[in-house]
Amino acid sequence: MSPIAPAQQQSLVSRLTDACGGSYTPETRRKYFISGPQWAGAYEGNALFHAPTRRPVTFEKVIEEYGKIGIAYWCTHDTDVIPPEQLGKDGQHEIVARIRKALADNGLKCSMVTTETFHHAVFAAGPAAESPEIRKYAAWRVCNTVEIGHELGAQFAVYWPGTLGYQIQGAVEETQTLRWYAESLNAACHRDVEVAASKGRPTMKHCLEAKPFEPQAEILLPTSDAMLGFIASGLLDYPDMVGLNPEYLHELMWGGAPRAALARALTAGKLWHFDINDGYRLKHDVDIAVGLVNPLDWLNVLVLLRSHGFNGPFNLDYKPPRTTSNWGVFAVSFPTAVDRFITLWEMAGEVMEDSIIREATAALRAGSGVSGNDPRELFEANKELMTLHELIGHRLVQILLGLHRGRVYLV
Ligand code: GLT
Ligand code: MN
Ligand code: MN
């Protein structure tokens, strides 16, 4: 192939994207409770070992592009959109008014707000640092975010306590740090109760998000399960207002099974918000877009969620790769991520209706009818049925690959 001159590259990428087919209309995409984070759309490709590859993008641009794609909800950190020195001041009110206008102009809603307690130098020792004045500032920040959330009509507040931990062991007393962290959350919930009452709005759902590694070397609440323990610890004044925002990759990162982690959150009644993305076990937080690495696992995750009535928010918390251009972020990355999610969600519906999986599952649950306390006899009585586990796996792969619709190779 001859070289593709820079001016021709976008049209080639567009043509090949269209040739992929399988895309949904913006109207269809809007029917799902899918949210796009400000920080994902505006991610410039920078990281510890990476210089940015993309130009900065404003929230007006992100909201406009999400609107065109059909991503119906938007979410943000306080400092993604408001410079830290403007927080709580006139600058904040002006920016919030501009956000409201951008959302209204483009037909989006704000679903969630979150507080950045990890990037700024003030959080070098985390949001629950020893210094009482830093903790007071952290509590003020989460309360301010709750106020922003009410002004933007958000239903959810997320907390990722990524700096709740340490680099240097022995310098931090873990039980004390957890108590201090609870104080901030208590302040946020308390402020929420007050603001909700004054505005006649429901209180928000406050969702904790775990990540096992990064940016601290050791993390005090590294998994969703640790967070369930924290919610039930007695340290929270409003435990009923606090639940989880698991992230698919964060559960995979520590070697867990995301579907099992989600199941534990569901049985605790705390699965409220879900960050959707993909990546690899026991690696860093690569935040690859949903379904690009583990589509079969994703299908199974969505079968679980659909069968338990979980219907979102599904938050596109991924990072468009550094090799994707500013144009490609909204022309290719987000629409294809949304469409893979919708396809997997609809496929999960198909799995639930599939007559083979239904009958196999029912047969396994019916058992053999042979009872008694002889373990060998019990095993023998069920052993043919248990072969269905593998058949169910085969059927799931058939559905994932379209083989159940007759896709075959001419061999
Ligand atoms: C950060 C983290 C994400 C969280 C964001 C919410 S911040 O990007 O890696 O997983 O969801 O604070
Ligand atoms: Mn996340
Ligand atoms: Mn992540």
Image: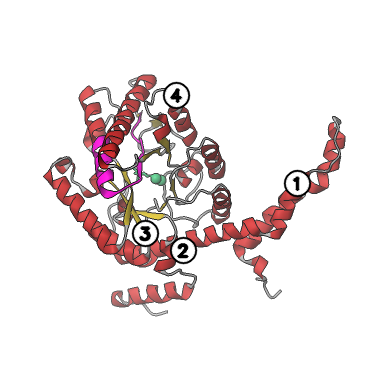
Q: Nearer the viewer, residue 317 or 322?
A: 317
> Element under label 4?
loop
Determine the image quadrant of residue 56: bottom left
Q: Looking at the rendered structure, which numbered label has been put on residue 327? A: none
**Horizontal placement of 228 versus 180: left or right?**
right
Q: Earlier in the sequence, mark 4 or mark 2?
A: 4
Count of all numbered marks drawn on residues in the image: 4
Spatial CA distance of label 1 from label 3 is 41 Å
Q: Which mark is drawn over residue 72?
A: 3
Contact, mark 2 vs mark 3 (Cβ under 8 Å) = no
User: Extreme left residue here?
Assistant: 90
193 or 154, which is in the foreground? 193
Residue 55 point in image, percent of width and height:
24, 59
Q: Return the disc, 2 or 3, that comes first in the chain's sequence.
A: 3
**Quadrant hosting residue 201:** top left
Q: In the rendered image, which residue does mark 2 sit on?
A: 339
Distance of label 4 from label 2 (alpha carbons): 40 Å
Residue that numbered label 4 is attached to:
233
Q: Report whether 136 appears left or right of 241.
A: left
Q: Mark 1: which amino acid?
A: Leu
Between the residue at mark 2 and the residue at mark 3, the CA separation in whole angstroms equals: 14 Å
Mark 2 CB within 8 Å of ligand 2: no
Determine whether the residue tagged by mark 1 lies in a helix, strand or loop.
helix
In magenta segment, residue 162: yes
